[in-house]
Image: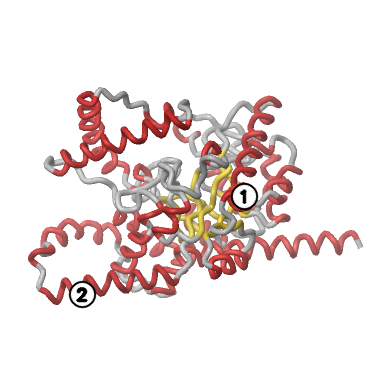
Amino acid sequence: MTARRPLAHLPFFFALLPFAAACSPGADEMPETARESEADLIARAREIHDRVITLDTHIDINTSNFTAERNYATDLPTQATLPKMEAGGLDVGWFIVYTAQGLLNDEGFADAYANAVDKFDAIHRLTTEYAPDRIELALTSEDVRRIAASGKLVAMIGVENAYPVGREISRIEEFHSRGARYISLSHTGPSQFSDAHSGENDGDYLHDGLSDLGRRAIAEMNRLGIMIDISHPSKASVLQTLELTRAPVVASHSAARALSDVSRNLDDESLRAVAENGGVVQTVALRSFVHTIKNAAHSEAMSALRAEVAAEMDFELIGRGGMYMLSDEERDAYMARMEELEAEVAERAAGMKIPPDVGVADFVDHIDYMVNLIGIEHVGISSDFDGGGGVAGWDDASETFNVTLELVRRGYAEEEIAMLWSGNLLRVLDEVQSVAARIQAEGLQAED
């Protein structure tokens, strides 16, 4: 696809943004024709958004929200629910079987496996018991298109951290049978399969990239048709994976390190290697990954204001970690108070000189950067909702349209937007499954 945006020299382009913003007339100063043009642009973006299949490759879950009494069929205080997806026009959500890295021993593997099965079962309950009339599990791109055409939402499953596999490679096939269509070999800290990105900061490397077990896991995922997720492993692990795999890979939730220097983002060498492999990088909308410096300045100012308001309300802030220790009722009560607090904080912040928040435009800067570096066919979109993700303007699934609007504003054509939202990821899934079919056929021929 030929890019139309004059972004060959990104640093120069970004340097012009403050100047352009300063020279642009405010909405009140715009002539009537310009305001009508903006209205037309929004209407055109809405039509495009309604036509394309929108797909988010990373939505974390808590299984306490997947019970008969409490589930995503109602609008829970989470960033992603079925009502929020429907309101925002988010067609496909990859729900994540995430397991934190633990000790590499039998007890750790057993606990991790139980956690993974619990999450697999929760996702299946949503699609078969709680809301089968509103959402259905997809295993292939054909499933995605069929379900979306029927008017229902689409669920898919990704595994964040292969730690629950233990040392039993056969569990990869079990996870495939449970619906997993991508698996990451590690999370934070080295797993039995690979080193993690976090080793760059803490020096905790165990394998100098992939372990022998990790190499076997790659071959098994190729055989089964599971996409290999490279968002969390170390750079050495990523590059070794790209050398070994017979199929394209996916980075399920990563951004461009050239724009935000964090170890979880991919540098230009890694991005080019993914493009050469034929894979796709699902750009992540997580504030600190999108714009580290801007996020730090805004967060510091808002945290101080939030603490001030909380003290006035006699309300103890406990953070995301503390919330996991609460019962469902306590969590709901806490979130209700948080809504009151945030409303007051927003009102006060409007009258203060608070550093700007990381927003959709910052997020799409990463899409632009990667499109111009490695080609539009290798770039996609992810939120990391309910796992720390979200930016101002796309802070939950109900605001999904704002991403399409920004893409239209920057000159992306409908065909390109369709590629970014789902076409590229589904193309990779198709190719991974085609490679698996060939490998399995080779195995049959060898047996004959």
126 or 223, which is in the foreground?
Answer: 126
Q: Position of residue 204 (x, y in %)?
A: 53, 29
Q: CA distance from mark 1 to mark 2?
A: 46 Å
Asked which secondary structure carries label 2, the reply is helix
Q: Is residue 234 visible?
A: no
Residue count near mark 2 (Cα–Cα under 10 Å), binned few <14, some 14–19, many ≥20: few
Given residues 108 and 104, the one toward you in this image is 108
Q: Which residue is mark 1?
A: 129
Q: Residue 442 is drawn in which quadrant?
A: bottom right
Q: Nearer the viewer, residue 290 or 335?
A: 335
Tell me the residue at 11%/62% (across/down): 26
Image check: 265 left or right of 297? right
Residue 299 lies, with reference to residue 286, above or below; the image says: above
Q: Is residue 11 left or right of residue 281?
A: left
Q: Amino acid at mark 1?
A: Glu
In the rendered image, residue 430, in percent from the top left (x then y), is placed at 62, 65
**Residue plotted at (75% across, 38% down):** 168
Compared to residue 204, the image places residue 149 above or below, namely: below
Q: Hey, what amino acid is under mark 2?
A: Ser
